[in-house]
Image (spheres, rainbow, N blue to C red):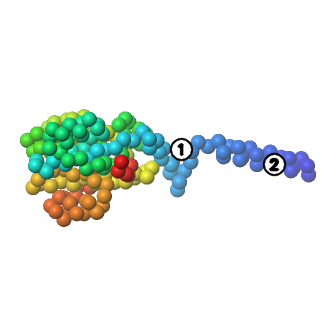
Amino acid sequence: MKFTLSLVSALLSIGLASAASIPADLETRGGRPSPVCNARYQAVPFLRSYNPQVIDHFYTTNGRELRNAVRNLGYNAEGSAGFIYANRQPQTTPLFRLYSSSATDHFYTTDLGERNNAIRSLGYADEGLAGWVYTTAICGSVPLYRLYSAQGTDHFYTTSANERDSAAQNGYSVEGIAGYVLPGNY
């Protein structure tokens, strides 16, 4: 009897120790691996500005670049469109930044084919990466909606469904979700 009790006790201890040693990123929810959430402190504000004279929304993670746009190029700072990563993180994808000087339009996309087409066929210049965004709604991220005004030749990005709907009522076409960003304004 003592031997059986000792054996059961030992097996339970081994089972509990094994379960406790499973790394958090290997645990599953509904049969799928849980996402590895990146440290929020590594995310930076995706700064938003707008130039009403040329009808252009401009987004950057660089504070100096935003200050220059405000002081010298006619843009008004509008806070942050959320938080993105300046460097690659697990489960993120690049957010490409392009600019058309003839249309005075900044354009952001995660789609490499769309980026290449805009450069090759639509007159956009590659301005590198705006940053890194999630491809799905994980880790508390929210959609970064993409809209376009053909009349103003302006791409507009927002995390606010109300702002998206208001822009759509004022001539912007909703083009879907550009990516997923961490919510918040600084």
Outermost residue toward the right in this view: 1
- The answer to whether residue 88 is left or right of residue 177 is right
Residue placed furthest toward the front: 71
> Pointer 2: what residue?
9
Give the residue number, with chain letter if any, for mark 1. Answer: 25
Residue 6, image x, y percentages: 86, 47
Q: Could you say which is closer to the camera, residue 173 or residue 66?
A: 66
Q: Is residue 112 visible?
A: no
The residue at the point 36 percent across, 48 percent down is 186
- Considering only vertical position in the picture, is 131 above or below 52? above
Residue at the image position 71 percent from the left and 46 percent from the top: 15
Image x and y of residue 65, in percent? 24, 36
Q: Quadrant of residue 86?
A: top left
Residue 169 visible, this orientation: yes
Closer to us: mark 2 or mark 1? 1
| Amino acid residing under circle 2 | Ser
Relative depth, front residue between 181 and 177:
181
Count neighbours of disc 2 (C-alpha within 10 A) and say few if under 14, some if 14 to 19, many if 20 or more.
few
Q: Secondary structure at mark 1?
A: helix
Which residue type carries mark 1?
Asp
Q: Is residue 55 above or below residue 169?
A: above
Q: Is the residue marked by circle 1 packed among few (<14), some (14-19), or many (20+) residues within 10 Å? A: few
Lower sequence index among marks 2 and 1: 2
Query: Answer yes or no: do the residues labelled 2 and 1 have beta carbons within 8 Å?
Result: no
| Residue sitting at the far bottom | 169
> Which residue: 20% across, 60% down?
167
